[in-house]
Image (cartoon, rainbow, N blue to C red):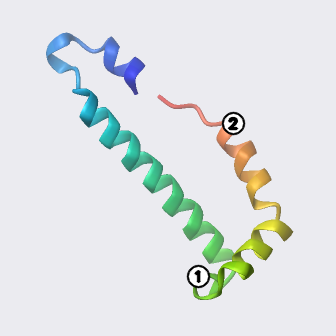
Amino acid sequence: MTEKNNQRSLDKRWPQERIDREAANMYYKFLVNIHDKISSNFKGLAKHDPNKWRHFISVNETLDQLEESVVELDFE
């Protein structure tokens, strides 16, 4: 985001606080999206205890798949 911001004209540049807020918002939406996708594949998972979440994530290699997906991301 900072790189893109630096390419803007001076009068259109965002202050660092806004960049930080936007980055935090993108991160939050990313995590919510992951949670929703996992929950939709395992009905009622959100209602279970953390151990069931860990088991599901481990058995389905969710973190490995997530890592591969994140590496492939292209931020514009």
Of residues 76 and 31, which is closer to you in this image?
31
- Is label 2 in a helix, a strand or a loop? helix
Q: Which mark is residue 71?
A: 2
- Say which amino acid is labelled 1: Ala
- Is label 1 in a helix, a strand or a loop? helix
Q: Is residue 45 depicted above or below 12 in this figure?
A: below
Q: Are marks 2 and 1 in contact (CB under 8 Å)?
A: no
Q: Residue at x 65, y 70 (%)?
A: 38
Q: Is residue 36 left or right of residue 13?
A: right
Q: Is residue 6 left or right of residue 40?
A: left
- Say which amino acid is labelled 2: Val
In the rendered structure, which disc, 2 or 1, sits on the residue that comes first in sequence? Answer: 1
Query: Residue 12 is drawn in which quadrant?
Result: top left
Find disc 1 in the rendering and name its residue.
46
Q: Residue at x 42, y 46 (%)?
A: 26
> x, y (%) of residue 5?
32, 20
Check the picture and name the quadrant holding the N terminus.
top left
Q: Residue at x 33, y 12 (%)?
A: 7
Q: Is residue 28 depicted above or below 49 in this figure?
A: above
Query: Residue 28 is drawn in which quadrant?
Result: bottom left
Q: Which mark is residue 18?
A: none
